Image (spheres, coloured by chain):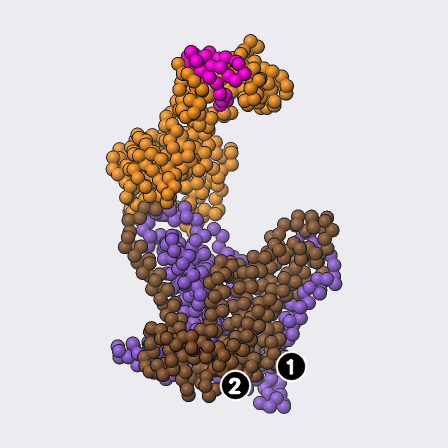
Amino acid sequence: MANIKLDKLTKSYGDTEVLHHIDGQIEHGEFIVIVGPSGCGKSTLLRMVAGLETVTTGEVSIGDKMINDLEPADRDIAMVFQNYALYPHMSVEQNMAYGLKIRKLPKAEIKRRVEEAADILEIRDYLKRKPRQLSGGQRQRVAMGRAIVRDPQVFLFDEPLSNLDAKLRVQMRLEIRKLQRRLGVTSIYVTHDQVEAMTLGDRLMVLNGGYVEQFGTPIEVYEKPASIFVAGFIGSPSMNFVSATAANGVLTLSNGTTLATNTTAAGAVTVGIRPEHLFPNKDGVLKIEVDLPEKLGATTLVHGRISGAETAFTASLNGINAASTGDVLSFDAPPEFLHIFDAETGKRIS
Amino acid sequence: MVENRPFLTVITHAVLVLGVIMIALPIWITFVAASHDELRMTQAPIPMLPGGHFWENFTRTLFGSGLAGNEITPVWRMLLNSLVMAFSIAAGKIVISLLSAFAIVYFKFPFRMGFFWMIFLTLMLPVEVRILPTFEVVANLGLLNSYWGLSVPLIASATATFMFRQVFLTIPDEMLESARIDGAGPLRFFWDILIPLSRTNIAALFVILFIYGWNQYLWPLLITTDSDMTTIVVSIKQMLEAAEQSPQWNIIMMTAMLAMLPPILVVIAMQKLFVQGLTETDK
Amino acid sequence: MLKRVHFIKIMLPLLLVAPQIAVTIIFFMWPAGQALYQSFLIEDAFGLSSEFVWFENFELLFDDEIYLQTFWRTAVFSSLVAVLAMSIALVLAGFAERVIKGAGAYRTLLIWPYAVAPVLAGALWVFMFNPTLGIFPFLLEKINIDWNHYLNGGQAMGLVVAAAAWKQIAYNFLFYLAAMQSIPKSVIEAAAIDGASPMRRFWTITFPLVSPTTFFLLVINIVYAFFDTFGIIHAVTQGGPANATTILVYKVYNDGFVGLDLGGSAAQSVVLMFIVIVMTVVQFRYVEKKVEY
């Protein structure tokens, strides 16, 4: 059973600690996405699981076996790198066969596995070519082919789609997902793109500055973000935030507007609401002064400020809206769509 | 990477240290030899640890006239000759190459390609291949035994010209266009813009060329018969010959050290530039 | 080749290239032409009379057993130097690349022989191997090997090969190290994940990927062995004993300056010129076809 356990992992370079107390349990066959902004430590974490970085404290286990001291070759894992890392001087076939040759598999078996993987990935025609003769998308597939033939316990992906153009990225995203479902191999996928994260992962681990902010399903992360960071990171366009004081189920904003909530929170809080959850209502309590409308066709993004309080707010309206600079629009902010965070710690209250 | 191979790490360092010893051994032996008195240096085997006479030998060699009984020029004079030669060659090559590269890259003029190929041709004619006739030419021009004769024949360098050409080709066209709009003529552009942009390349090349110039052997050997024009590198050979009769190895080795020191210091002090110069000129 | 944006003037560029072209013509072209011309003449030692003899000098040259031997000897010499200097450098670079801290220190300690003039390298090695005083003959005697390179041709050759290779290791090391460091780390990591041990990674991944450098260094090392080793030979063995270490370039010097056989020496120069041209063409051809990864 290839379940993965991350137990109190930390990583330091010299005196600087870059990953703090990472905990997580990944079930066999799960597709986990580690997502976060640049520099949050997600690649480092992945590389620690791969054995390309050492663990400072804590334990990594695969299938209940601690692997901290095992070399990458002995961990029975396969990895797809951001720049594919194909062996430039070998053909596609040789690239895929390399790991199997080392493990001394019989020639017939190697051939079978390579051809099978090539069929799945539709790269059968390129087997004799060298990497430099392939396009980005093709190289990507070869990199995955190299991982598949190994039939490992775990697949690791380090931002494999970042070097592809937007259209290809969308296409490959689906293929990766389908492939993983079909093969059922436990996978960890690292990306900074939250859309990729939302569409690919069974569960998301949101990392920021070396801390795990939240580890949950895409829906959980969207509907109940555990902190201001997660709330602002997931979802596009991003959530709006405004400071307020909470008392007795009522939130008071700096401009005097009051919003009803179901929360028992009290004191200084930060309130969040997604642009798509601001409902236009000419009697609505939340008034926004329009700075700039963005007409995208299917939706219109209205960028503005809360009247009286200089907090920037964006609303997402359906279809093409005639709002223009200077207008004041009114919105409802229903309590069930309000996210309330502690003003100091940024953690979710309700 | 997680690597549980402490044995390999030990081997790695062992091999590298062995390599360093292999490379350093001759120099160490020379240093040791330069620090003993002559008597000790006539007894076999030669010592492996330094003696106490280093500074004594140093002053004697530098200011004395080399080997006793073989009155040639004082070593400091030879060091000076080497310095002038090396410097002239390096500076000369750089200046000439900058000018030619500039002309070939930035001007359209008759015979442009002809000149380019002519310069290219010189890559195929190292001095060793044309020694006799070049000697004749220099002799006919009356340049034997002079600093000019030592440096000028070695000054036309295809490698430097090509390197600068590469550098100039990568400078964006917009630079020239905006300079022109600002009113700069070609020479102004060359001086105010091209040269400052090529600064690191010039420095890197200077390091390489200085060493090249300092270490010249065959050419100075041929054209300097006057003992005060001898360069220090050439004098070593003469001392070796004299060693047959009166072996003063400590002086010989001290002279060798003095001959080696300037280029070595240059390489070490300017290592980064030096490596850059090497890897860029040999493309 | 020519910048898209350029000046159209005539006097100025001509003046700019003048110095280089002048030196090139006076000290390169003219002498080369002279060598070519002289190789078709037989002159007496006093230069008083000369006779145009077409290719006779060349015929004599290639009939000369000694010259042919020199040719062969030079080939052997340069192969030995190239192989020795390159393989040692490859191994050292391979190990140096593994060291994370201290790679810089090793590099500094290994590259400085580049700064030593070949003739000095020769002087140092001949000192170490001096039959009476040298430390190595002393040690060799203890295992019953008599060292005297003044008498033994094979030993003399061995000595100059060692001195020449010693000097060149530094240069090769630098290039190999740079080439190895430019291999993307992820390719090596992928090999590690695929299960390759360090030794295997070196031979199946690193070594093939530095092959452009290997070819490049091969040409450079051979040219070095052909020409720049003059100083070493002159300092150590003066071509002896009995011509055992006379290589082509040394013979040109010897026959021309010492033996005063101008025609013969000029013919040899021409042959050498031809060899250089072939090698330069090979190098440029190869560099054109640079293996693109």
Q: According to the image, label 2 marks what residue?
A: C258
Q: Which chain is brown?
A: B
Question: Which tag is nearer the camera, tag 1 or tag 2?
Answer: 1
Whether residue C199 is situated above or below residue A210 in the rendered picture = below
Whether residue A161 is situated above or below residue A289 in the rendered picture = below
Question: Mark 1 falls on what kind of element?
Answer: loop
Between C275 and A63, the one lying in front of the other is A63
- Classed neighbour count for the residue bearing mark 2: other residues with Cα under 10 Å, few (<14), some (14–19), many (≥20): few
Q: Position of residue B31 (x, y in %)?
A: 40, 73
Q: Which chain is purple?
A: C
The boundaries of the magenta stretch are: A239-263
Please, what is the three-letter code of the amino acid marked with disc 2? Answer: Val
Q: Chain of mark 2?
A: C
Which residue is rendered at x = 37% and y = 26% of the image?
A216
Between A292 and A78, the one lying in front of the other is A292
Which residue is rendered at x = 52% and y = 71% of the image?
B214
Which residue is rendered at x = 36% and y = 64% of the image?
B19
Q: According to the image, label 1 marks what residue?
A: B142
